[in-house]
């Protein structure tokens, strides 16, 4: 009798748990999504496409498993047998990662592929469908997927051209990536002119930009920011962890000016000091222009990189010095997630974006979101996808929905949260918080 009662209790508990999870998940499906970060662009060359090599990030897991490079000049024509012979073993080793789950979400939702992982026999049909959508009917496909996924807007970081202001505002909101503005100060100081970045020259409508002194360079930076602001930019983006450490010292004007004015090459420390000075200047301008600053923290994409560059605690001096600035920290600061959460708890001017974390590690995203809800007011939490093509945005959003629904339903089941509050949290993460912080209508 006791065994039967226990079994009934387990069944009831499981049913309630599934019910709460499904209710949250279904509710998120009704929300118009404000996606805080993507890198969406028109796909370029279909010759190198081979189903899973261009999935955002997943190729990194296959490389990590030990595979040879996908970018073999001889691989310019799709062949399922040769592809599987070369990469199939490494693909199979990667079938349980979160990057792979993002990929399978995409295939299930957009291509009705209901198997838990790919098999060689299915590659040709998938290849043909994906080629048709991505390369032959891209505009139609993009619009269809965008509307089906209920995106309201996507903040698009054009990392391939930091100075492009022309976007389709029916889909995107403009982001100003300031990383080049920070890094190019070294060229400006050493050459007293800028000529290397053709996109900057195009934006400024000049063949060469003269930078005789530090003030010339700061005026150029201010002009770039003003152009973006006038074109509707809703935020700035710092991705410098891929190039250097994100510790930005407070360098005074006199020191920066002395370095800028020296004749010849700057040493490594002098270059860093100039970059630090420029980023502090940009933060001050962001306050005047009411432009929040998104900052890459934590893990670096790919299979090589100086991971310690992005430790979120390195930003501490900025949060203290600029209380009126709005800093949005990305990626859970993974693997330093608790430090990341502590910063969001401590500082009014620090917001936390789950962007990319569910793809890096779904389990860690669930654990971190739980910690965030324990420690941080939920008006400071957002979500973004951080992928390259619209297909992957669907898969990454599904992972984000899974993470949020899992955390919120568990809290309801434990009596830690009411369903009403849980739905408000979900709506805040996927729409309301970003709308408020970025001033979106």
Image (spheres, rainbow, N blue to C red):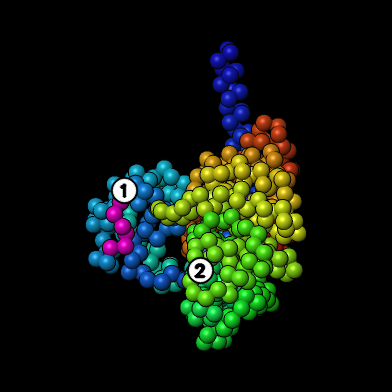
Q: For marks 1 and 2, give the CA distance.
A: 39 Å
At 56% from the left edge and 49% from the top edge, which residue is drawn? Answer: 311
Q: Magenta span has 68?
A: yes
Q: Is residue 231 visible?
A: no
In the foreground, 114 or 104 = 104
Q: Which circle's residue, 1 or 2, is located before the other in the chain?
A: 1
Counting from the top left corner in percent of width and height, residue 115 is at 40, 47
Counting from the top left corner in percent of width and height, residue 341 is at 64, 44
Classify mark 1: residues with Cα within 10 Å, few (<14), some (14-19) or many (20+): some
SS for callout 2 = loop
* Image-quadrant location for residue 321: bottom right
Q: Is residue 165 above or below residue 425?
A: below
In the foreground, 351 or 78 = 351
Q: Magenta span has 236?
A: no
How many numbered tags mark residues here? 2
At 57% from the left edge and 83% from the top edge, which residue is drawn? Answer: 210
Q: Is residue 17 above or below residue 261?
A: above
In the foreground, 289 or 173 = 289
Q: Is 294 displayed left or right of 107 in the figure?
A: right
Q: Is residue 131 visible?
A: yes
* Image-quadrant location for residue 124: bottom left
Q: Is 157 displayed left or right of 131 in the figure?
A: right
At 56% from the left edge and 83% from the top edge, which residue is drawn? Answer: 209
SS for callout 1 = loop
The region drawn magenta spans 66-72
Mark linked to residue 266 = 2
Mark linked to residue 66 = 1
Taking the view exactly as shown, the residue that stands out farthest to the top is 1
Name the mark nearer the viewer: 1 or 2.
2
In the foreground, 233 or 274 = 274
Mark linked to residue 168 = none
Q: Quadrant of the C terminus?
A: bottom right
């Amino acid at each position: 009798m006791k065994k039967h009662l226990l079994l009934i209790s387990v069944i009831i508990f499981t049913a309630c748990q599934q019910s709460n999870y499904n209710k949250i998940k279904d509710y998120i499906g009704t929300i118009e999504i404000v996606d805080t970060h993507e890198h969406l662009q028109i796909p370029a060359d279909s010759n190198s496409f081979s189903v899973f090599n261009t999935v955002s990030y997943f190729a990194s897991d296959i490389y990590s498993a030990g595979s040879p490079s996908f970018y073999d000049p001889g691989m310019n024509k799709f062949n399922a047998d040769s592809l599987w012979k070369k990469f199939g073993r490494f693909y199979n080793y990667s079938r349980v990662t979160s990057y792979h789950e993002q990929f399978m979400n995409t295939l299930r939702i957009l291509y009705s592929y209901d198997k838990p992982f790919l098999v060689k026999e299915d590659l040709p049909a998938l290849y043909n469908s994906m080629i048709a959508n991505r390369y032959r009917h891209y505009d139609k496909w993009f619009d269809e997927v965008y509307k089906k996924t209920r995106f309201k807007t996507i903040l698009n970081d054009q990392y391939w051209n930091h100075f492009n202001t022309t976007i389709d505002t029916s889909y995107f909101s403009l982001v100003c990536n300031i990383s080049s503005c920070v890094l190019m100060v070294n060229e400006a100081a050493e050459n007293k002119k800028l000529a290397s970045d053709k996109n900057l020259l195009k934006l400024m409508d000049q063949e060469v930009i003269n930078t005789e002194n530090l003030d010339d360079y700061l005026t150029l930076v201010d002009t770039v920011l003003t152009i973006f602001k006038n074109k509707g930019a809703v935020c700035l983006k710092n991705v410098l962890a891929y190039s250097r450490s994100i510790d930005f010292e407070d360098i005074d004007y006199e020191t920066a000016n002395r370095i800028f004015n020296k004749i010849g090459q700057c040493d490594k420390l002098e270059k860093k000091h100039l970059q630090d000075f420029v980023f502090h200047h940009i933060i001050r301008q962001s306050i005047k222009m009411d432009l929040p600053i998104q900052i890459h923290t934590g893990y670096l994409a790919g299979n090589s990189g100086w991971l310690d560059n992005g430790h979120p605690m390195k930003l501490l001096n900025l949060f203290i010095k600029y209380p009126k600035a709005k800093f949005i920290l990305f990626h859970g600061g993974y693997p330093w997630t608790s430090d990341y959460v502590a910063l969001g708890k401590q500082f009014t001017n620090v917001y936390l974006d789950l962007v990319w974390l569910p793809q890096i590690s779904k389990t860690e995203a669930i654990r971190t979101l739980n910690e965030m809800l324990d420690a941080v007011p939920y008006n400071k939490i957002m979500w973004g996808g951080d992928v390259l093509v619209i297909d992957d945005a669907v898969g990454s959003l599904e992972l984000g929905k899974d993470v949020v629904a899992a955390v919120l339903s568990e809290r309801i089941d434990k009596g830690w949260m009411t369903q009403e509050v849980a739905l408000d949290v979900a709506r805040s993460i996927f729409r309301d918080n970003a709308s408020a912080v970025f001033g979106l209508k």
